[in-house]
Amino acid sequence: MGNFENDEASRARKLAKRRKTNLVLNSLITIVLLLIVFVTVKIFFGDGQSEAEKSDAVVVDKQLDSEKADVDSGNKDEEEAKVEEEKKDASDLEEESENEDLEEEVSEPTITEGGSSPDVKQTIVNSDWQPVGTTQTGEHQAVYDSASVDWQEMLKAISYATEIDVENMTVWFLGNNGGPQSAAGTVSDKGGGPKYRVAIEWVDGEGWKPVKVEELKPE
């Protein structure tokens, strides 16, 4: 009877120990499973969120770059427009200055009745007339050829004195006026009006200069 009770007690202790061991093992297995689930969720959902955040960051960067490019482009356009406006203003001022200089040069002419021949209605002289400039260099010799630079510069001087634009000018005569550096031309406006006989002289390094304009009587 005593041995039986001892065996029962021993068996009970073994069962209790086995249950305790199983409980510990089950607890450990549960913890491991939870860790596996946690890591799995972290890997998939955490990375997904990270990628989404990265994607959002890239989109934001692109938007910022685009906005910056638009701003830079707008500023560049404004600067270019401002430069063009300043150039135009400078050009207008220069043109106005040139026109004022020209007006001063042709101001207060002296006009007298008649002239060097009976067909002259009146003679116009202006001491403010200046040489019209030249692109020619070296020793000058008058060239009466319509294709020459000298011819074109003669017409420029005649236009300056008569205020008839070269493009609207009819040239009736252009030739020597009694000296190697003296010429005369008879011209009129293509649109009509009086004829003018203009005497010009060459100034070394400065070009042809008007010296006298004679308005001719109608034929």
Image (spheres, rainbow, N blue to C red):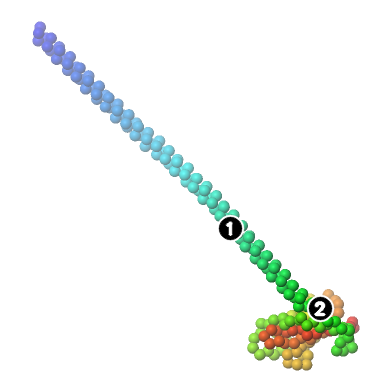
**Residue type beneath disc 2:** Glu
**Image height of 155 relative to 67, above or below:** below
**Residue bearing mark 1:** 76
Dot 1 crowding, Cα within 10 Å, few <14, some 14–19, many 20+:
few
- Left or right of 195 on screen, residue 179: left
Asked if residue 57 is positioned above or below residue 1 in the image, the reply reads: below
Question: Which of 117/103 is in front?
Answer: 103
The C terminus: image quadrant: bottom right
* Quadrant occupied by the N terminus: top left
Give the quadrant of residue 128: bottom right
Q: Is residue 171 visible?
A: no
Image spot of residue 103 (x, y percent): 77, 74
Where disc 2 sits, the SS reads loop
Viewer-proximal residue, 59 or 91? Answer: 91
Q: Nearer the viewer, residue 208 or 61?
A: 208
Check whether the beta carbons of the residues at disc 2 and disc 1 lie within 8 A of each other: no
Q: Residue furthest top?
A: 1
Residue 137 drawn at (x, y percent): 64, 86
Judge whether residue 1 can be spotted in this image.
yes
Q: Which residue is mark 2?
A: 108
Q: 10 Å neighbourhood of mark 2: few (<14), some, or many (≥20)?
A: few
Q: Which x, y percent locates residue 185?
A: 79, 85
